[in-house]
Image (tube, helix red, strand yellow):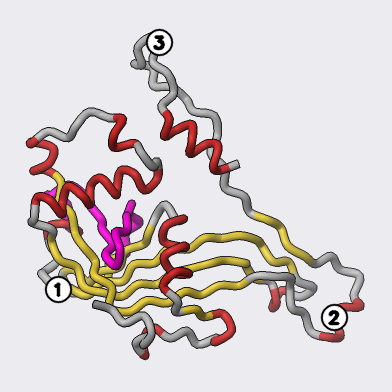
C-alpha cells in the first residue's frame, strides 16, 4: 500500500510552491475530473489514451472492450501513468512570457493489473458508471453476462502520486505593472447543458434523478 507520507522521488514536483502530496487534495482532483489520460508502453512504444476512470480507495479503474489493445496488451504489473487536469482560468499577463493557466492536476504512477475477480470487476463497473452520474447504475438495466464478459477492467494500484496547481493573478515583472496593458484572469466554467432526449425515447419517460442532480450540481 502506498505511503502518502513518503512521496517517491520521481513524484516530486520541481516547483515546490505548486506541489501537493496530500491524498485528500489528490483524491479531490481525481473525483472531480471526468477524463484521465492513461500512459502505457505497448509494443515498445509510448501510448497515451483519454479514458473514463473511477476511484475506489487507493485503486483507480479503467475499462474497455476486451478486444481493445489497451485492455488486452498490458502485462500483469505493467507500469502506467494516469493524469487528470482541471483548468480554472486563463491567466493573462502584461508579457507573453508570463501568460499562464490556473489549474489543478494529479499525476499517478503505478502498475496495472487485469481485474479477474467477478466481485471486484462488478464494483469497478459500478464505480465507473457512477463517476460521471452518481446513482446511474441503479437506474439502468442490469448488465447481462455477455456484456460482462465482453468488458475488460484494469486496476491501477498507486505507487506514487502528486498534485500540482496554480491559482491567483498573473505575476509580471515589476517594471511591467505600470504598462497600460490589460492583465487578469478569464475564468473557465464547465457546466452541463439542457439534456437532449434520445429520438427513440418512449412517451412519458421522465428525466432520471442522476441527470437532474448532475445538472443542478454543475451550476
- On screen, 191 above or below 155? above
> Does label 3 or label 2 sit earlier along the sequence?
2
Mark 3 lies on a secondary structure that is loop
Q: Residue furthest bottom?
A: 9
Q: Estimate the x, y position of residue 93 in percent, counting from the top left.
A: 75, 71
User: Mark 1 or mark 3, which is nearer the start of the sequence?
Assistant: 1
Label 2 CA crowd tier, 10 Å (few <14, some 14–19, many 20+): few
Nearest to viewer (mark 3 / mark 1): 3
Which residue corresponds to mark 2?
176
Inter-mark Cα distance, 1 to 2: 51 Å
Q: Residue at x 29, y 37 (%)?
A: 137
Between disc 1 and disc 2, the foreground one is 1
**Mark 3 closeness class: few <14, some 14–19, many ≥20 residues within 10 Å:** few
Per the image, is 67 magenta? yes
**Badge 1 vs badge 2, beta-carbon distance below 8 Å:** no
Residue 5 x %, y %: 38, 85
Q: Are marks 3 and 1 in contact (CB under 8 Å)?
A: no
Instruction: Give the x, y percent position of residue 121.
Output: 15, 51
Write down the region rendered in magenta: 48-69
Drawn side of residue 25 relative to residue 151, left or right? right
Using a 10 Å C-alpha cutoff, classify the residue at mark 1 as few (fewer than 14 neighbours), some (14 to 19) or many (20 or more): some
Q: Residue at x 48, y 68 (%)?
A: 105
Residue 114 highlighted magenta (yes or no)? no
Which corner quadrant holds the C terminus?
A: top right
Q: Indicate the quadrant where residue 183 lies.
A: bottom right
Q: Main secondary structure of the magenta part?
A: strand
Q: CA distance from mark 3 to mark 2?
A: 62 Å
The residue at which mark 3 appears reads as 204
Q: Earlier in the sequence, mark 1 or mark 2?
A: 1
Image disc number at residue 77: 1
Disc 1, SS: loop
Question: Is disc 2 placed on a helix, strand or loop?
Answer: helix
Amino acid at each position: 500500500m502506498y505511503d502518502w507520507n513518503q512521496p517517491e522521488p520521481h513524484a516530486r514536483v520541481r516547483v515546490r510552491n505548486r506541489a501537493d502530496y496530500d491524498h485528500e487534495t489528490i483524491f479531490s482532483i481525481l473525483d472531480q475530473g471526468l477524463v484521465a489520460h492513461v500512459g502505457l508502453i505497448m509494443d515498445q512504444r509510448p501510448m497515451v489514451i483519454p479514458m473514463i476512470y473511477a476511484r475506489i480507495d487507493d485503486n483507480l479503474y479503467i475499462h474497455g472492450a476486451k478486444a481493445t489493445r489497451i485492455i488486452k496488451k498490458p502485462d500483469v504489473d505493467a507500469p502506467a501513468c494516469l493524469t487528470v487536469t482541471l483548468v480554472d482560468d486563463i491567466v493573462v499577463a502584461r508579457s507573453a512570457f508570463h501568460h499562464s493557466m490556473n489549474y489543478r492536476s494529479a499525476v499517478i504512477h503505478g502498475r496495472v493489473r487485469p481485474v479477474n475477480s467477478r466481485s471486484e470487476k462488478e464494483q469497478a463497473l459500478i464505480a465507473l458508471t457512477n463517476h460521471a452520474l452518481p446513482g446511474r447504475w441503479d437506474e439502468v438495466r442490469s448488465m447481462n453476462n455477455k456484456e460482462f464478459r465482453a468488458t475488460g477492467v484494469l486496476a491501477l494500484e498507486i505507487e506514487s502520486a502528486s498534485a500540482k496547481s496554480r491559482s491567483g493573478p498573473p505575476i509580471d515583472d515589476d517594471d511591467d505593472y505600470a504598462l497600460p496593458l490589460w492583465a487578469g484572469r478569464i475564468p473557465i466554467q464547465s457546466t452541463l447543458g439542457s439534456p437532449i432526449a434520445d429520438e427513440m425515447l418512449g412517451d412519458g419517460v421522465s428525466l432520471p434523478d442522476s441527470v437532474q442532480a448532475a445538472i443542478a450540481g454543475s451550476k
